[in-house]
Amino acid sequence: MSTGGSEPRPTRNQRREAAREKARVLREEQKKRERRNRFLIQGGVVVAIVAVAALIGTLIFNSIRPEGPGPQNMASDGILLVGGENGIEPVQTPAIPAGGEPTATVPDESGTVANIVVYLDYLCPFCGQFETTNSETMRTMVEQGAATLEIHPIAILTNKSAGTQYSLRAANAAACVAEESPEAFFDFNALMFENQPEELTAGLTNDEIKELAAEAGAASSVDSCIDDTTFKSWVQDATERALTEPIPNSELASVTGTPTVLVNGKQYVGSLEDPAEFQAFVLQATGESYSESEATPTPTPTPDAG
């Protein structure tokens, strides 16, 4: 009878040794997995630490970044716009040097010109109301030579834009336009309010701000200035000065909110949505009609003959 060549059944000792060998292999594999996981975790921690360190370094660098000069054409911390042959033109001035102080604008004291000064924040909804109501009126007055307009962009609502620092970025962009393309400033300022975001939102992106600058006629050189927040330190300094120092050519101890609007040194506190009220205030403050480019001469009485 044939046995068929079948394998003999493993003994108890052989089964025990096989089990031990299998357990040993499993333990080695487990150790390898643990070492691999530990390496990955440690590597991830190192990467995270490096990333956090880089972020902290950037924040520290930005916070202690040395002050740079201010923008050209804003020696007073604001840009002065006047009427000219080509419409509204900027008065060109040198930049405030690093660590320097602004130079107050000398107002027109002829009594025939309204010196309008506006401190504004591009996120401020009340500034938006005032600008929407009065922008075209002020454009006409400046173009006709009946007024000058000095605009001071400040950033008091930097923490009201979901972490994007929109007020600061917007004021910096205005400074960039003032330096690179001051002739486009009035239109850029108007477009910023026509496209004003709501408070507590992220606001416009840098790309959207650059598009508005281009629409206003600004040169492409403003783009890198906007992206780099070149005038961040100046915006912060100008805002601090506005909030803590006397306002030139007025009796105001400081700016306490935006918009702060002055006409020949007198503060406008009327309606932000009634153009007639602001126009009447300008007339009262300057004593002349802003709707005509030239003052109407007063007739001289003719002496009686004989």
Image (cartoon, rainbow, N blue to C red):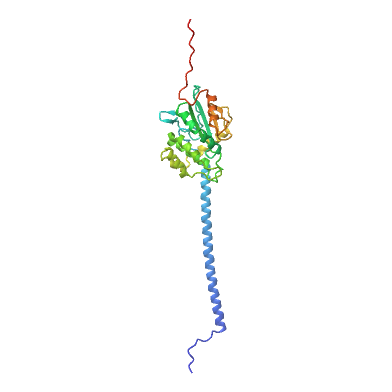
Residue 227, image x, y percentages: 46, 43
Where residue 254 sits, quadrant-wise, is top right
Query: 116 above or below 36?
Result: above
Could one spot residue 66 in this view of the protein?
no
Query: 297 above or below 58?
Result: above
The one of 208 and 28 positioned closer to us in this rendering = 208
Residue 61, image x, y percentages: 51, 44
Q: Residue at x 43, y 38 (%)?
A: 216
Residue 29, image x, y percentages: 52, 70
> Residue placed farthest to the top in the image?
306
Could one spot residue 51 in this view of the protein?
yes
> Residue placed farthest to the bottom in the image?
1
Where residue 89 sits, quadrant-wise, is top left
The one of 14 and 193 positioned closer to us in this rendering = 193
Please give the count of numbered marks on the rendered protein. Answer: 0
Where residue 224 sits, quadrant-wise, is top left
Residue 279, image x, y percentages: 53, 28
Q: Residue at x 49, y 39 (%)?
A: 194
The one of 95 and 252 positioned closer to us in this rendering = 252
